[in-house]
Amino acid sequence: MLTFEQMATRLLLALFLGALMGLERQLVGKEAGIKTGMLVSGGASIFSMVALTLPGIFSSGNPMVAVTDAGFPIIANIVVGIGFLGAGIIIKNDGSHVHGMTTAAVIWTTAAVGTLVGIGLTEFAAFAAAAIVGLLYFLRKAGVGEKLIPNGPQ
């Protein structure tokens, strides 16, 4: 069972990493920024810790309670829930151009980072967050991902 200190530390780390990922979006003027990144990563971390804690709570020392996978559906539903959030960010303009795909993908990966922190894989979560922010920055500087067809489909 996780202690309060472990949960608080994981939550704070998830909030920090989410802010870092959201900062990149905010600096380039996109729809979701620091606050969104913090909430998505922090929320995913909380739900992941709930998933880890539930088996211990439900068993309460009772060996008759099967708790081997009690929390895993919670983690699986993080992916689904964040998918809906990301879908709400994607906007289709004039039937030919879509906006918000990268921001939606960043929100999805921010939830993944929060989940990693929540289950205790903090080093990999920090590495993943740094790698994602670095890739976004360098690919933007290199012009990768800009419109390939300036006037839309022919």
Image (cartoon, grey):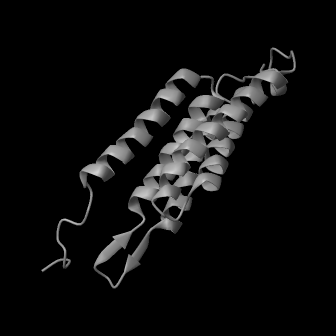
Quadrant containing the C terminus is bottom left
Residue 50 falls in image quadrant: top right
Percent x, y for residue 4?
Answer: 84, 25
Q: Is residue 42 above or below residue 99?
A: above
Q: Is residue 147 above or below residue 19?
A: below
Can the viewer see residue 51?
no
Residue 11 falls in image quadrant: top right
Percent x, y for residue 8?
Answer: 78, 30
Can the viewer see residue 103?
yes
Between 68 and 90, the one lying in front of the other is 90
Name the residue: 49% across, 36% down.
129
Q: Is residue 50 above or below residue 61?
A: below
In this view, the residue farthest toward the bottom is: 94
Total marks drawn? 0
Percent x, y for residue 88?
Answer: 53, 67
Between 18 and 71, the one lying in front of the other is 18
Name the residue: 82% across, 20% down.
3
Name the residue: 71% across, 38% down.
46
Quadrant containing the N terminus is top right
In the image: residue 20, left or right of residue 153 = right
Percent x, y for residue 124?
Answer: 50, 24
Residue 134 falls in image quadrant: top left
Between 147 and 55, the one lying in front of the other is 147
